[in-house]
Image (cartoon, rainbow, N blue to C red):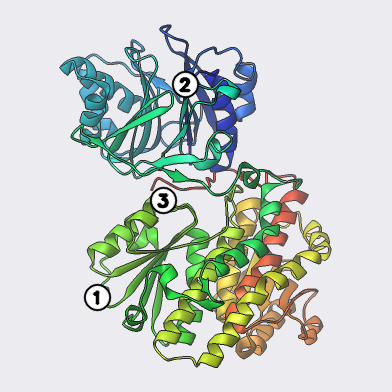
Amino acid sequence: MCGIVGYVGNREAAPILLNGLEKLEYRGYDSAGLCVRNGNEPCVIVKSKGRLSALENKTDGGRALPGHVGIGHTRWATHGEPSENNAHPHSSDDGNVVGVHNGIIENYQELKDKLLRHNYSFYSDTDTEVAVKLIDYYYKKYGIGPVDAINRTMVRVRGSYALAVMFKDYPDEIYVARKDSPLIVGIRESDPAEGISGETFTASDVPAILQYTRSVYYIDNLEIARLRAGEVTFFNLDGDEVQKEKHEISWDAEAAEKGGFEHFMMKEIHEQPAAVEQTLRSALKDEELDASVMGFSEEELREISSICVIACGSAAHVGFAAQYVIEDLCGIPVRVEYASEFRYRNLPLDPSSLAVVISQSGETADTLEGLRKAKRSGVRTLAVVNVIGSTIAREADHVFYTMAGPEIAVATTKAYSAQLIAVYILAILIAKAKGKISAERQTELLEELKSLPRKIGRILEDKGRIQWFAAKFAMAKDAFFIGRGLDYAVCMEGSLKLKEISYIHSEAYGAGELKHGTISLIENGTLTVGVLTQPEVYEKTLSNMVEVRARGGYLAALTVDGNFNVEDTANFTVYIPRTDPHFMASLAVIPLQLIAYYLSVSKGLDVDKPRNLAKSVTVE
């Protein structure tokens, strides 16, 4: 959600900033802008509404903005409509301070009123302009330096933010600060062979700077950094210098490119076998699951009395799948809470329970606050995240990193699949520690997990029929997904995928709930997808599908190899390989992802960047 890029070095900044912003397009945005400074000359700001290509055309690919220092931004509207006026960067009245901002400043109106009393004027509807002018106010009133001016602003601001700021009096520097919104700093040392004398970058996500460096620092909450060419200095709220550990990014720039696929989403769908295998392999030691990868001892796992999963969107759907798997294998209760609801509830948690927070980015605002609330409740916390060094990973008591690599498409696919593997592993480890499964059963389950990448690959080889089916329903207005038990959890994810990238109204229902109202919506041709992978409820769901067909609905069935009698009921059937029923979500979700993808393509929509959505939701 929104994107920040900054550069200080000896190369032209604007083309580097544009390239970085392009790598952040997946985060979602409605306008973009650059601020570049050439030596002691005043900052030059250029902004545009719409896609980044408009800004590129306006600046001739950056060539029209000479200068070696600059900041760039892609905006996703919160305060004020999408417009060139509301686009970032924003400037103080006299151009003394220029800045960009991700996040939401909750008390911006109060701060704006204060500044109006001190003769500041405002040209936009944004909270960001308020923040920039508040920095300018403190800088001038107290005659203090940039770090102290930003510190005073941070103390007054309520909300979340990642800030990148340039000062007129400091032409070769950028200052950055953060609270609850992600921000990293990258360093590239001098390289005489390429004519580089040292460069420093800042960005809201790794892909923006990966082409230039893999050496990054993660800025912690309520910290500030001063960026100069080839160097960075970090400060706390007292203005004291702090030391930070440098991290090396392991995946390369090619991992964030399309690799010959038409869309990132299709590329990432095909990367799921590798994401699943690598995530599983990361938890193995001598071909056996190792609890230490999550930082647990056998005794700690044995003492867990219940689990509360805290997540949003697709990550919450992983939690609903985990609920069925963990309760069945481990014999302990599991509840799943949407983080946006959990953070405002007074839910009593048993001291011996485990809170599992799931987030691809590790920066999801509601999930982060849910984690903090769980910790305040005194329970142990486990983070399942995909980004090393992310805020949720750093703040949780335990962390398990999924090995999905960079996921660019807004609609998650491979991160979801990797998260499923993580909760399967957790379930097996707890079940083993509690003596709920035998050594032989553990071996059986592990072998089934190891077979999943190959079976996902088999499904992907047969996607042609799904493409035909999706084209047939490109004009659908409504769709329903029905299933029971674990199949219902899969339906929730399939329905979300369909609605978020094809804009078709879609709902997931427990199949047994149809007759309690929803079936009244079924009419001739209404698309209904029935998921039937769980043996104990197969016949029940099939009966519900018969009820839909009797009312004229078009039935698509998703089931396992061998259940051929479903064709007597369904108009179209997709078969997936057999595996242990606990792990069926990993296979069943693949055709549902493909259906959503091909429907979106058939409608000519922007698959990777659906309207109104952002990849990483870092504001409430």
Return the residue found at the far top.
Answer: 41
- Classify mark 2: residues with Cα within 10 Å, few (<14), some (14-19) or many (20+): many
The relative height of residue 360 versus residue 575 in the rendered view (above or below) is above
- Classify mark 1: residues with Cα within 10 Å, few (<14), some (14-19) or many (20+): few
- Classify mark 3: residues with Cα within 10 Å, few (<14), some (14-19) or many (20+): many
217 left or right of 261 in image: left
The numbered mark, 1 or 2, whose residue comes first in the sequence reads 2
In terms of secondary structure, where does tag 1 sit?
loop
Kindly indicate the quadrant of the structure image that contains residue 350: bottom left
Instruction: Identify the disc placed on residue 351.
Output: 1
Tell us which disc is closer to us: 1 or 2. 2
The numbered mark, 3 or 1, whose residue comes first in the sequence reads 1
Q: Amino acid at mark 2?
A: Gly
The numbered mark, 3 or 2, whose residue comes first in the sequence reads 2
Q: Which residue is mark 2?
A: 70
The relative height of residue 298 versus residue 318 in the rendered view (above or below) is below
Q: Amino acid at mark 3?
A: Ser
What residue is shown at x 61% (from left), y 48% (from top)? 409
Tell me where residue 338 appears, x and y as whole percent: 41, 63
Return the residue found at the far left.
Answer: 142
Residues under numbered marks 3 and 2 in contact, where contact means CB atoms less than 8 Å apart:
no
Kindly indicate the quadrant of the structure image that contains residue 80: top left
In terms of secondary structure, where does tag 3 sit?
loop
Q: Amino acid at mark 1?
A: Pro
- Residue 342 in sight in this render: yes
Instruction: Identify the disc placed on residue 390.
Output: 3
